């Protein structure tokens, strides 16, 4: 690789202060109401899928690689273009992290759904849960809606909170951008439909790989923070160790099991996706979840997000000091 190319691809030292600022922006502001870059990326991905689709894994790998590497390269080029203008570079990093996070929106959806259930509006709650899950909702009873919501909150604690923070600590602005691109492609083509079973294979596997460390960190934090949701650490740890590997998803399993144990509820069981019924193992050994448990899950997710931000900030400081010691002044105050 040439020296200019190596310089372009070299990961800049991350800033702990930038990570915390990006996390704070999501807590205070939530998702941008207009011109959200993730929505724009999704529209581009859909357009390219129609042009590049082929029932081959190689075609899907090319598609995913182009979009994920392209998104990361754009973020890196933007950083490089700002040169030594540190405040602008930090502002860009805060912006990319903020738009990659979704913790506030996740909590809001959970609280609004719980409110509908507490009012007895089951039909509206079935419609509302669509924002959180992709399963069939028409036959869900109240416990089924609660279970679907808690499972989604648990899984998305990694996708929407911990993973962007971890990758921001590791790879600067390009980290959360690349992760959110992979996660979005998984939602678009990664599901097992006849059209995407082979074409979406690469996107799904990339998302699994990139989410793997955040899912484990998030599950451990959920265990440690179980008392914040009125649960017990030992029950959460027991459920994580016993049930975390039973789920068909390598990343959803640990988080859903840890949340089930922390909340004292039972998750998993039968679900339907596009008319296809899946019987999944039970996670946790508690009672059926109720509306109040959705609020507890949202609270636990928020605490895990805060702890994930602090751990990621510490990781950023450690990496900056050990791997790029000469670049510490360039990275700004940490």
Image: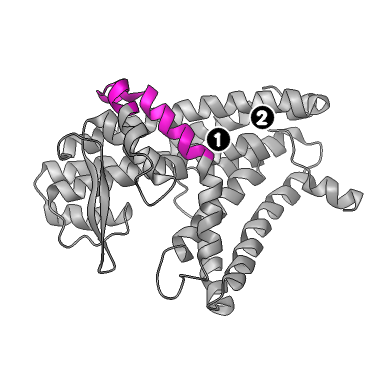
Q: Quadrant of residue 19?
A: top right
Residue at position x 65%, y 42% in the image: 173
The answer to whether 238 appears left or right of 30 in the picture is left
Q: Nearer the viewer, mark 2 or mark 1?
A: 2
Q: Quadrant of residue 140?
A: bottom left
Q: Which mark is first along the chain, 1 or 2?
A: 2
Residue 266 at x, y percent in the picture: 21, 39
Residue at position x 71%, y 33% in the image: 87
Provide the residue span drawn in magenta: 213-237
Q: Quadrant of residue 218?
A: top left
Q: Which residue is mark 2?
A: 15
Residue at position x 54%, y 60% in the image: 203
Q: Is residue 292 magenta?
A: no
Secondary structure that dominates the magenta span = helix
The kind of secondary structure element at disc 1 is helix
Residue 303 at x, y percent in the picture: 39, 27
Q: Is residue 221 magenta?
A: yes
Residue 24 in sight from this viewpoint: yes
Residue 210 at x, y percent in the picture: 56, 47
Mark 1 neighbour class, 10 Å CA radius: few under 14, some 14 to 19, many 20 or more: many
Depth check: 26 or 230 in front?
Answer: 230
Q: Quadrant of the C terminus?
A: top right
């Amino acid at each position: 690789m040439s020296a200019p190319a190596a310089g372009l691809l070299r990961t800049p030292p991350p800033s702990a202060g930038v990570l915390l600022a990006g996390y704070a922006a999501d807590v205070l502001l939530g998702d941008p109401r207009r011109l959200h870059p993730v929505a724009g990326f999704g529209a581009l991905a859909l357009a390219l899928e129609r042009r590049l689709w082929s029932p081959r894994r190689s075609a899907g790998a090319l598609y995913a690689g182009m979009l994920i590497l392209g998104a990361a390269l754009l973020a890196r080029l933007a950083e490089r273009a700002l040169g030594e203008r540190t405040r602008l570079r930090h502002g860009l990093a805060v912006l990319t992290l903020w738009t990659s996070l979704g913790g506030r929106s996740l909590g809001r959806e959970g609280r609004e759904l719980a409110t509908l259930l507490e009012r007895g509006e089951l039909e509206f709650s079935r419609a509302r849960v669509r924002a959180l899950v992709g399963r069939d909702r028409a036959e869900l009873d109240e416990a089924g809606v609660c279970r679907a919501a808690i499972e989604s909150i648990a899984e998305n604690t990694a996708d929407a909170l911990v993973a962007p923070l971890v990758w921001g600590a590791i790879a600067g602005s390009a980290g959360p951008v690349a992760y959110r691109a992979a996660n979005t492609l998984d939602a678009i083509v990664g599901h097992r439909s006849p059209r995407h079973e082979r074409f979406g294979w690469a996107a799904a596997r990339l998302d699994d790989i990139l989410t793997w460390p955040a899912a484990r960190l998030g599950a451990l934090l959920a265990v440690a923070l179980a008392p914040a949701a009125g649960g017990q650490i030992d029950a959460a740890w027991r459920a994580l160790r016993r049930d975390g590997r039973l789920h068909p998803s390598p990343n959803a399993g640990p988080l859903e099991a840890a949340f089930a144990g922390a909340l004292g509820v039972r998750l998993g069981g039968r679900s339907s996706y596009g008319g296809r019924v899946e019987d999944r193992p039970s996670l946790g050994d508690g009672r059926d979840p109720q509306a109040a448990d959705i609020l507890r899950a949202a609270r636990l997710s928020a605490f895990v997000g805060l702890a994930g931000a602090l751990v990621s900030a510490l990781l950023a400081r450690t990496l900056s000091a050990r791997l790029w010691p000469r670049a510490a002044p360039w990275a700004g105050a940490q």
